[in-house]
Image: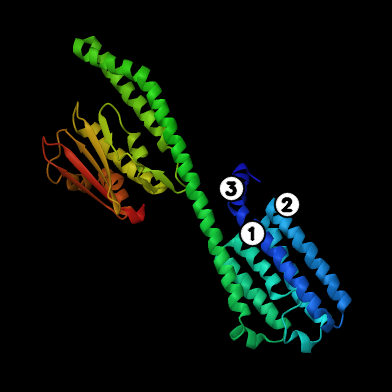
Amino acid sequence: MTRRAVRSALATDGVQAPLWRAAGVFRLLTLGYAVGYQFVAVSNYTRPRLSWLFIAVMAIWSGACAMAFTRNFLPYRYLVAADQVVVIGLMIATRAVAEHDWYSTHQTFPTTLWATNAVVSAAILGGPFVGALSGVVIAAVSAVVRSRLEFDLWADATAPILISVGLAIGLAANTARRAHSQLERATRLSAATAERERLAREVHDGVLQVLAYVRRRGNDIGGAAAELAEKAGEQEVALRRLISQQGTRVAMADTAIDLGGLLRSQASSAVVVSTPGEPVLVGRWVGGEIAAAVGAALANVELHAGPGAKAYVLLEDLGSEVIVSVRDDGVGMAPGRIAEARGQGRVGIAKSIIGRVDALGGTATVTSEPGGGTEWELRVPRTNT
């Protein structure tokens, strides 16, 4: 088993542990009911000694399950499968201890209530569908054993009760797993945010202040010192970007990531990135495509906007959609330049920016004029993130 599988199994056990403990208590209570029913019904059995042997099997199995499900001696899937087999076997054993006239008008030997334990264990492990399926199987076995198949399936309460138990317990188990997953994600994000803030404070008190001072003084002195100021400014931006990424690199789920963190990683001395203070969660693949489209727009700024041009990236989360604006103060483009480039076979913009956003179900629009810079607006529906 891989480390990831082990961690997943441990996490699942932690989530389900209260449910398994409750199921263990329920199993022991139903065993008490089954034993009490045995004292009442044993005089009607044709083989009372054999029935007591089956009662001993029920007691041993109930105790073993109560311990195994709470202490995880074996993988749960094997225990649940064995539980189904033992319960069905004991239900079929009804015909070995009683005559037809008896079992056709009474519940099966291990009692319907005790047989419900198989449905409960299946629902906790597999969710509502598996729980309901187990309920159908147990109800069908009960009806077949008692030779009341047609009547039981349509009029008796056994099937509806067992299926309802499977659905209810399965939904509760799924809800517990989802709540645990959300709590884990929130805990990881909180820890990452706290670490980022601590790192930012420590670095700001030292390195960042020195870099900012060198940049200001170099620009004031000019000449050769201006080049040193530029380098100090680039390192200051890079360090700030590194600090900001400490909390955003923690994925909120296997398929979710903070789009703001992806965009901030593209900041530089010539690129200013503004994002909301809270994480803007999108699908991992969707976030990568949006970030790639923004990267392509920034590459065009570097290549075509002219020397000294700066770019500004703004991320907005409108709830139903996310909007990313990429604006520069460069030389701009003549009207129809994109269509002209596409006609010449140069499809870099069409594929790298417009094509990516179109594939996400969004829209990419560009406005530009000579000497007035260029602005891209990328809109992606939240339903696709």
Front tag of 2 and 1:
1
For the question of whether residue 94 can be seen, the reply is: yes
Query: Residue 220's x, y, as percent?
Result: 19, 12
How packed is label 2: few (under 14 Cα within 10 Å), some, or many (20 or more)?
A: few
Q: Position of residue 293 (x, y in %)?
A: 31, 43
Relative placement, left or right, of 16 versus 109 is left
Q: Position of residue 205 (x, y in %)?
A: 36, 19
| Image quarter of residue 240 | top left
Q: Is residue 352 above or below residue 96?
A: above
Taking the spot 61% from the left edge, 81% from the top edge, the residue there is 157
Specify the quadrant of the image occupied by residue 381: bottom left
| Pointer 3 residue | 11
Q: Which residue is mark 1?
A: 22
> Which residue appears farthest toward the right when viewing the image?
49
Mark 3–mark 2 Cα distance, whole angstroms, equals 16 Å
Point out which mark residue 73 bears: 2
Callout 3, which amino acid?
Ala
